[in-house]
């Protein structure tokens, strides 16, 4: 069997942490008298913590000192981590284990490619850390998606050329990053938003083991 590199985004692909990001940002925005909606939260998917706060402040027409900015980032992350602490295996999105188990069974290299600095903590909480041969996250990339850096680093760690890598992503920035890396991109979520992906599925329940096998054999 051929070897392909399978790279998974974390938030919105393996677990639905967007709801926790939303609650933590909402609380922070409220403390600053900024209105923050779920629609705006959609625009923060795949966006780094720094960029997310910059956007929220811009939406609220607020500017803060550098110190205050750092303080706000820490406050948000503390609240977010309180939610993360309650997570367990039940929060893994449906049929993600089906695909991971199959990939492990047929010896395909698996990596995480996430913007989150909390990625390892989350993978530990949901007991999936052992499934990954490589983890590239917000602690070891300098350029945010749609820059391909995160996925190129993951491919390098798996020792698989980019053209033989397959990326699962729920954000448009992530799909663009995968395409920029010359990888096969698979959009998980709204196909209208993720039109640029090579393949689209609403979630992993729509992805069959046969489809994965075809990707490996291609
Ligand atoms: C991405 C999320 O995966 O990680 C974003 O989609 C989040 O919403 C980003 O802002 C950074 O995450 P963290 O955990 O480092 O704040
Ligand atoms: Mg995501």
Image (tube, rainbow, N blue to C red):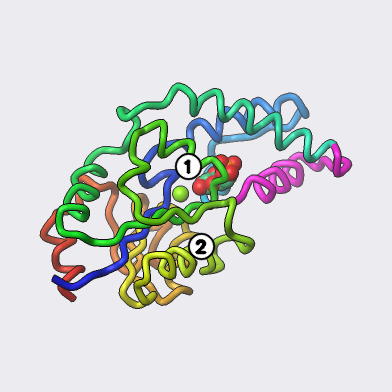
* Helix, strand or loop under label 1: helix
Q: Quadrant of residue 161?
A: bottom left
Q: Position of residue 204 (x, y in %)?
A: 25, 47
From this view, report whether residue 52 is shown above or below residue 198: above
- Neighbor class of circle 1 (other Cα within 10 Å; few <14, some 14-19, many 20+) is some
Task: Give the position of the C terminus as an image quadrant.
Answer: bottom left
Q: Position of residue 110 (x, y in %)?
A: 32, 57
* Helix, strand or loop under label 2: helix
The answer to whether residue 40 shows anywhere in this view is no
Front residue (pair 7, 140):
140
Task: Give the position of the N terminus as an image quadrant.
Answer: bottom left
The answer to whether residue 185 shows anywhere in this view is yes
Give the CA separation, mark 2 to mark 1: 15 Å
Looking at the rendered image, the disc whose residue lies closer to the viewer, 2 or 1, is 1
Q: Residue furthest right?
A: 65
Mark 2, residue position: 150
Front residue (pair 165, 72):
165
Q: Quadrant of residue 93?
A: top left
- Neighbor class of circle 2 (other Cα within 10 Å; few <14, some 14-19, many 20+) is many
The structure residue drawn at horizontal position 58% and vertical position 56%, both measured from the top left corner, is 140
Q: Main secondary structure of the magenta part?
A: helix
The structure residue drawn at horizontal position 42% and vertical position 47%, both measured from the top left corner, is 10
From this view, report whether residue 190 is shown above or below residue 77: below
Q: Earlier in the sequence, mark 2 or mark 1?
A: 1
The circle on residue 120 is: 1
Left or right of 53? Residue 100 is left
- The answer to whether the residue bearing label 2 lies less than 8 angstroms from the nearest atom of ligand 1 is no
Q: What is the total number of numbered labels drawn onto the structure image?
A: 2
Query: Which span is picked out in magenta?
Result: 47-67
The structure residue drawn at horizontal position 26% and vertical position 69%, both measured from the top left corner, is 4
Left or right of 60? Residue 196 is left
């Amino acid at each position: 069997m051929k070897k392909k590199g399978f790279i998974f985004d974390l938030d919105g692909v393996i677990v639905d942490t967007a709801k926790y990001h939303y609650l933590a940002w909402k609380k922070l925005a409220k403390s600053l008298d900024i209105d923050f909606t779920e629609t705006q939260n959609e625009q923060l998917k795949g966006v780094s913590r720094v960029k997310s706060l910059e956007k929220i402040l811009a939406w609220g027409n607020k500017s803060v000192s550098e110190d205050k900015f750092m303080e706000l980032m820490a406050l948000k992350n503390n609240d977010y981590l309180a939610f993360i602490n309650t997570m367990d295996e039940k929060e893994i999105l449906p049929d993600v284990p089906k695909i991971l188990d199959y990939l492990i069974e047929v010896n395909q290299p698996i990596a995480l490619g996430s913007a989150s600095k909390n990625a390892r903590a989350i993978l530990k909480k949901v007991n999936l850390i052992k499934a990954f041969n490589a983890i590239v996250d917000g602690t070891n990339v300098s350029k945010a998606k749609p820059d391909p850096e995160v996925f190129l680093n993951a491919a390098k760690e798996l020792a698989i050329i980019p053209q033989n890598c397959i990326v699962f992503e729920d954000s448009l920035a992530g799909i663009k990053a995968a395409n920029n890396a010359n990888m096969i991109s698979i959009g998980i979520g709204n196909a209208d938003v993720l039109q640029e992906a090579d393949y689209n599925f609403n979630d992993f329940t729509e992805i069959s083991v046969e489809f994965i096998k075809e990707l490996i054999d291609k």
